[in-house]
Amino acid sequence: MRNVAANQLEAMLDDGDPRSLRTLNKFAVDLMSIPNEADLFWYVAQNVVGRLGFVDCVIYTADVERQELTQVAALGDKNPYGRTILNPLIIPFGEGITGKTAMAAEPTIVNDLLQNTNYIPDAQPARSEICVPLLAGGQVVGVIDSEHPDANAFGTAELEILTTVAAMTSAKLELLSEAERSKQRYNDLVKTHAKLSEEICSRQALEAELHESRKLEALGHLTGRLAHDFNNLLTVISGNLELAEAYYGEPGSRRYVQEANLASQRGTQLVSDLLAFAQRSRLVLSETDMNRLVGDLCKVSVMPTDVDLVVELCPIESRAFVDPGATKSAINAVMTNALEAMPQGGVLTVTTDIVGRSPTSRAALPPELSPGNYYTISIADTGVGLAPERVQQVFDPFYSTKPATAGNGLGLSIVRGIMLQSGGTVVASRNEPTGAVIELFFPVH
């Protein structure tokens, strides 16, 4: 607050006025603890101006838009009701000495009110008057006014004192205004945050409801298909065992037993797939050279004559804790799916890389993965491809683009189960202009 007010205070007190010095020093100290404008105005009127030798004081606040002053505090005969103003005086800008001071934004001293045509007489007419504007941000925010029953009561000393008080009061008003603006901004921020939190909670509730609905739908689909497949398997087993029992000893009975055994093996595989889909497989993790695992698997993979296999391994050696057998099963399942999507032949491309090392590749990670480095295996085909609305369905249990009578099982859902249980994930996308891409993400050790 060391500005015009401080400089004026020092200049005024050079002559030495102990009472004024004590009053203004106390005002400067008390300013920091005054909480609001009303307390400030009454403190200035009663504890500052009233103790500096002025017989009365009236303080007005200014409404710039309406161009008028409103009485908010008073001292002396003009304040007989303590801190209560009955019928506060309202003065338009430019009217009377106080209104002209507000209009001009300059201090005014009138030595003889009887000679001034702008004077508006009170119930007890005065002879002298002094008015000092309150300025904040270069704009008039109020006026401090004092009258005296004697002529020539106000001079340079009184003007300096009242100007100093006005400057200190104006500075405090600016601080209070800024505090109020900060409080309002904080309240607006709290309201915005509350509204955002409400929207987030509402969205999360809707997402949870949608997730639960989809989960129940998937479980219902899974249960129905599972019961159907097991019923078929059990029918084959029981029928062939009955035939084996009826024709035991006949040469053809061995064929029935073999078919029963084959059906039971398929049942065992189905149970294994179910465990993988449910992420309940017993994985045995070990530190594995991923490039070697993928390279060796591609070397022994048998491709149709009309399919070209292209393998592009990452030049950086990388290791991951995985179950080698489960990982090979997942890769084989994806490659088999890709080959089935190319009945007329095409190109099967297996590419490996390490992602997550740079800000760009980190931003491209699937959202369900934690930040870190991941070894990726991308398997792309040039087959029939996927419709945009079908991309996210490829990992649903029993999803297939083949006819209902061709093939069975959980499809790529078992790959997703293995990947999630390994700490990674799997993502499907379209391979423009034709085909599909399946990417496996393994956390790098």
Image (cartoon, grey):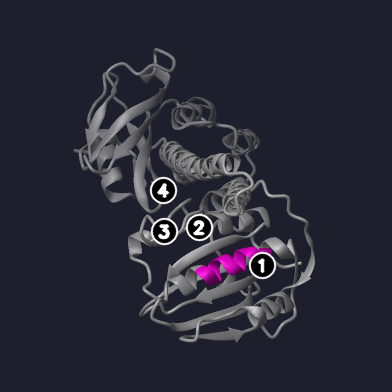
Q: Quadrant of residue 291?
A: bottom right
Say whether residue 373 is left or right of residue 4.
Answer: right
Which amino acid, by three-letter code, is at mark 4? Ala
Which amino acid, by three-letter code, is at mark 2? Gly
**Nearer to the camera, 336 or 209:** 336
Identify the mark at residue 131; answer none if there is no mark. none
Q: Which residues are magenta?
A: 327-336
Q: Are marks 3 and 4 in contact (CB under 8 Å)?
A: no
Q: Is residue 161 at least partly visible in the picture? A: no
Q: Which residue is mark 3?
A: 400
Provide residue 37's location: percent of width, then percent of height.
Answer: 45, 32
Say whether residue 136 is left or right of residue 376.
Answer: left
Does residue 92 sit above or below 278 in this rendering?
above
Front label number (4 vs 2): 2
Say whether residue 14 is left or right of residue 8.
Answer: right
Q: Which residue is mark 1?
A: 328
Q: Which residue is mark 2?
A: 411
Which amino acid, by three-letter code, is at mark 1? Lys
Does residue 353 sit above or below 4 in this rendering?
below
| Pointer 4 or 2: first along the chain | 4
